[in-house]
Image: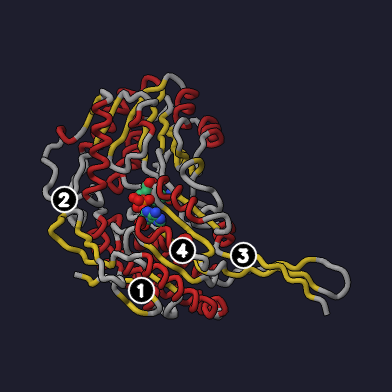
Amino acid sequence: MTPGRNYVGGQWVPARDGATFERRNPADPADLIGVFPASKPADATAAVDAVESARRAWAKADPEKRQRVLERTAELILAKLDPLARELTREEGKVLASATQEWRRTAANFRLYASEALRMQGETFSTAGDGLVYSVREPVGIVLAITPWNFPVSIPSRKIGPALATGNGVIFKPSEVTPLAGQRMVELLLEAGLPEGVIALVQGYGADIGDTLVKAGAVGAVTFTGSYATGCRIHQAAGPDKRLQLEMGGKNPCVVLADADPARAAQIATQGAFSLTGQACTATSRVLVVGDLYDAVVREIVAKAKSYRIGNGLDPQVTMGPLANEAQKQKVEAMIAVGKAEGLHIAFGEGDLEMPLPAPGHYVAPTVFVDVPPESRLSREEIFGPVVCVSKLASYEDALRHANAVEYGLAASVVTRDMGRALSFSADIDAGIVKVNSATGGVALNAPFGGFKHSSNQTNKEQAGHGVMDFYTRTKTVYLAT
Ligand code: NAD
């Protein structure tokens, strides 16, 4: 068992009051992953003070040093890939191939942002006489990164990477569901040479420490990924003078047009719906099928759902792992119950499995609701589990209208051979990411990422592009006279 600690002021420490929480393997709750500090406001304040006293030296460090630390972190991740991935599967539950892919992406993110350390550029402006007016980019100060459990290392890396590259101090508050992954991330950065105190790790429950961290005067920017409800809370707590990046939930549609191949459409829809046991913000949650193709698409989706092998993600035969914890399982089961109470028909669910769900472990069967009215609750609320709603629509216009008729706007896909329709769908859908003939989930390393509406406050896109580095830096204009 790993001893869980906070990292504050260059020291690995327990919570000041000694309080702890446990994390257990979602595939086998008897397997204790670790015991971690249940931090309180005093721990949060100590973390802010510690980073505040260390961050200025990091801001003034040679950019090549910042670059090297991030490059080295990537190298260390790749050197330890297999044990890191196994540990991630044990803690979060995703299948080993997905865990391996996530750590690889994490290394790639650190590489990408390493190079940004050398690209903090300002401008000069024409002015009268021999004076000079110029702007410089400087770090915002302390960046607070609050992250979810479903991508517990790749999401933090695309926040911590650019924050450190640009010379900020960082406070990292991982999800209480994946504390060990958070601790590993900080250990790797320190092993790679990150100076003590530039980062602080604060473990625990957001409800206990979130407000203290977000409201701290020394925190200049908050980058958050998680649910809409928590995003709203952070928005309220932050006040007007903090930079905020809020990346939140999704209710992502896959629209299947009448000219599509049903098998290909089902492959795209189910890959989107069931990868990572449906626990992706970009997961396909609604399949909107236009016209007579409907029955064939449903048949193919059911066949795909049936083909999943459910179990412990460390077993190489397994293609769907457990939900991340008991609470998550209960939420998903509650949404399945909502569908049943709404009188919706299940074409594939737990009762149709060839083998019973493994026990113990927080498992839910891939579940396919069909003939779902697009106005139903199941069609509108985020489920965050392996549940998909299939609806039949009379026309492309109807499908587009329903695709847009939810509060979220993160990802959407369309399956068609008609590139004209694909282009008009891409223009008319209210989603930050549009996929033509591929699943809603899975995004490029070097392309902007983020949603519209309730999915994001849309300050700066995450991942790549100038906007990312803008979020982590501020501009100062200098007037120089002789
Ligand atoms: P969550 O909102 O419950 O928790 C996210 C983080 O916020 C955790 O670290 C949590 O401890 C912290 N937190 C909780 N209360 C807080 C408070 N009052 N103040 C500050 N921090 C607080 O979300 P989750 O269950 O971890 O993740 C699932 C959600 O995340 C889903 O809605 C999913 O769609 C979303 N998500 C979005 C993206 C994206 O890029 N848009 C990516 C992954 C997940």
In-image side of 438 versus 297 (left or right): right
295 w.r.t. 79: above or below:
above
Q: Earlier in the sequence, mark 2 or mark 3?
A: 2
Label located before the other in sequence (3 or 4): 4
C-alpha separation, residue under disc 4 versus residue under disc 1: 14 Å
Residue drawn at (24%, 62%) of the image: 21
Q: CA distance from mark 2 to mark 3?
A: 47 Å
Q: Quadrant of the C terminus?
A: bottom right
Q: Earlier in the sequence, mark 2 or mark 4?
A: 4
Q: Quadrant of residue 42?
A: bottom left
Quarter of the figure that contains the N terminus? bottom left
Graded by Cα atoms within 10 Å as few (under 14), some (14 to 19) or many (20 or more), the crowding at tag 1 reads many
Res 155 seen here: no
Residue 28: where, in percent of width, then height? 15, 55
Mark linked to residue 144: 4
Q: Label 3 is placed on what type of residue?
A: Arg
Give the distance between the C-alpha atoms of the residues marked 3 and 4, in whole angstroms.
16 Å
Q: Nearer the viewer, residue 239 or 196?
A: 239
Query: Which three-letter amino acid code belongs to the residue tagged 4?
Result: Leu
**What is the secondary structure assignment of the residue under circle 4?**
strand
Can you identify the residue that label 1 sits on?
7
Marked residue nearer the N-terminal end (2 or 1): 1
Q: At x 51% / y 76%, what residue is drawn? A: 55
Q: What secondary structure is found at the residue carrying circle 1? A: strand
Q: Is residue 24 above or below residue 286?
A: below
Q: In the figure, 99 relative to 76: above or below?
A: above
Callout 1, which amino acid? Answer: Tyr
Mark 2: amino acid: Gly
Q: Looking at the rendered structure, which numbered label has been put on residue 474?
A: 3
State the residue at coordinates (43%, 38%).
Answer: 437
Residue 301 locus on image (x, y percent): 28, 33
- Residue 386 position (above or below residue 399): below
